[in-house]
Image (spheres, rainbow, N blue to C red):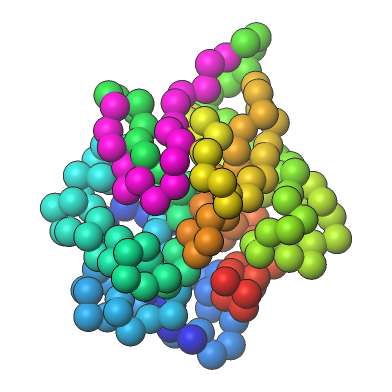
Amino acid sequence: MRIAIIDYGMGNIESIKGILSKFENVRVEHTSDFEVLKAVDKIILPGVGSFHSAMSRIKDQKIDFMLNELCVSKRKTPLLGICLGMQLLSQGSTEEHYTDGLGFVSGTFERFTPVNTERIPHVGFNQVTINTNSILFKNFRNTKPDYYFTHSFRMLAPVNANCLLSTTSYIEEFVSAFESDNIYGVQFHPELSQSNGIKLIHNFIRYS
């Protein structure tokens, strides 16, 4: 099994490599080389930082065209977006100013609006109410596992007819994970979420 972590200069790379190292027979590539990406079995899009800066780097390196060809238009390579990586899979975000995303799922990201004394960003462990039909949460006995979050923007629910959603409550109910065919996104960090993160990555490796 070969898994590529997309290299565009933004992401929690070492932690993702660390969780992938727990699985036997998994070879990890950290790359933006198209020829390497064509040969892998699955792709992870990481991300930490600004949506606008991330999309600028992705476009500069033509990673948007690569991912579209490999995961959407010509092939169906499974793709997992983590945190900012999940946000980049959407139509866009209002961070700084509106910026178009990759557009692999419908829906956009907007900043949380505090109601009382809630702090932004949303940081720490929180429950995810999982969709029991999902691949990422397959065979989970606990329907509300904890995952580690750190983010200020949340997804306005996508409208893809085939999209499965899992949600989390902070200020409001928001989309914390989605699955649309071979496209997967999680707002939290499975690589920082101990055993529940390992279970999720196991499911992505085995079942996606």
The answer to whether residue 27 is above or below residue 47 is below
Against 193, residue 103 (above or below) is above
Q: Would you place residue 60 above or below residue 29 in this image?
A: above
**Image height check: is 69 above or below 142?**
below
* Residue 96 in view of the camera: yes
Magenta-drawn stretch contains 111:
yes
Q: Please report the residue visible at 53 percent of the width from the left and 78 percent of the height from the top.
A: 21
Give the x, y percent position of residue 169.
70, 31
Q: Quadrant of residue 141?
A: bottom right
Q: Is the magenta stretch mostly helix, strand or loop?
A: loop
Q: Is residue 25 magenta?
A: no
Tell me the magenta residue range: 98-114
Residue 142 percent across, percent down from the top left: 84, 55
Q: Would residue 117 be found to the left or right of residue 3 on screen?
A: right
Q: Answer with left or right where residue 64 lies relative to residue 138.
A: left
From this viewpoint, which residue is outermost toward the front? 161
Closer to us: 30 or 135: 135
Q: Residue reaching furthest left? A: 60
Q: Which residue is drawn at 77% across and 56% down?
A: 132
Q: Position of residue 189 (x, y in %)?
A: 56, 52
Quadrant into which the C terminus falls: bottom right
Q: Position of residue 49 (x, y in %)?
A: 35, 41
